[in-house]
Amino acid sequence: EAQVTQNPRYLITVTGKKLTVTCSQNMNHEYMSWYRQDPGLGLRQIYYSMNVEVTDKGDVPEGYKVSRKEKRNFPLILESPSPNQTSLYFCASRGTGATSNQPQHFGDGTRLSIL
Amino acid sequence: AQSVTQPDIHITVSEGASLELRCNYSYGATPYLFWYVQSPGQGLQLLLKYFSGDTLVQGIKGFEAEFKRSQSSFNLRKPSVHWSDAAEYFCAVGANTGKLIFGQGTTLQVKP
């Protein structure tokens, strides 16, 4: 089954304690992206990756890092989390090239609470 | 600037009634437009998409949307709402970097 898998689904942690949210897709997609969802703001892009070792900032990248060492994985790293990063996070992927602008497939989300 | 506006934050309709969710976009080129639905605790599921061609597009679960370039709109419609349609709905435009620009979302409540 084609899917985007995020872990963990829920996490409560404290300010300053480094955390990583993993994202994996099994569709051999080149493009992967992270969004955060906040009430009244919809989803906003944090970082995206066009392919392995190619990443770029989205609209709200401050406080986040990403890496793309393998095609299937795109972890989101919060080096020193702060309460304003409490949010619902989504990973997404889609193909490129002939499938450019095809719909993105979303994971089920990770709810982070930073105390 | 590229943006998407969903004017209605919250809509309540009776089961069996028709539904229209509004979406307006601002985008310089020909837009790629999407509607997604998010049920509580779930990810986003694609309802339908518009890339080109026929301006009336059909989606899953009985939804349809009409692209109107002159009004910069892409409204979502359903002729008869079911209780299971209660969810949050997002309109999005696909930018040339590949990212999706989302509207703020519309929460749909269905009265029995």
Image: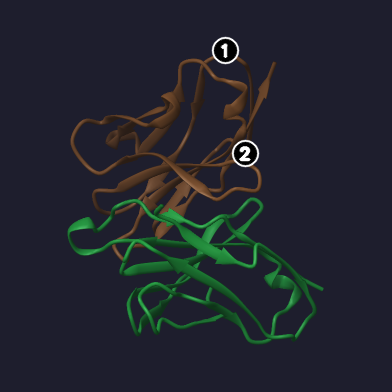
- Chain designation of label 1: B
User: Residue B71's x, y, as percent?
Assistant: 34, 34
Colour setup of the view = by chain
Q: Which of these two is toward me, B68 or B13?
A: B13
Q: Examine the rendered structure and indicate whether residue B86 appears above or below residue A95.
A: above
Q: Residue at x 41, y 57 (%)?
A: B100
Q: Residue at x 45, y 61 (%)?
A: A92
Which residue sits furthest front?
A1
Q: Which amino acid is tagged 2?
A: Ile
* Among the 4 quarters of the image, the one containing residue A7: bottom right
What color is chain B drawn in? brown
* Among the 4 quarters of the image, the one containing residue A22: bottom right
Q: Residues within 10 Å of mark 2 (few under 14, many from 20)?
A: some
Quarter of the N terminus of chain B within the rendering: bottom left
Residue B16's mark? Answer: 1
User: Residue A103's x, y, as percent?
Assistant: 35, 51
Q: Which amino acid is tagged 1?
A: Gly
Q: Residue at x 60, y 36 (%)?
A: B87
Please name the residue that numbered disc 2 is placed on. Answer: B9
Dot 2 lies on which element? loop
Tally of numbered discs: 2
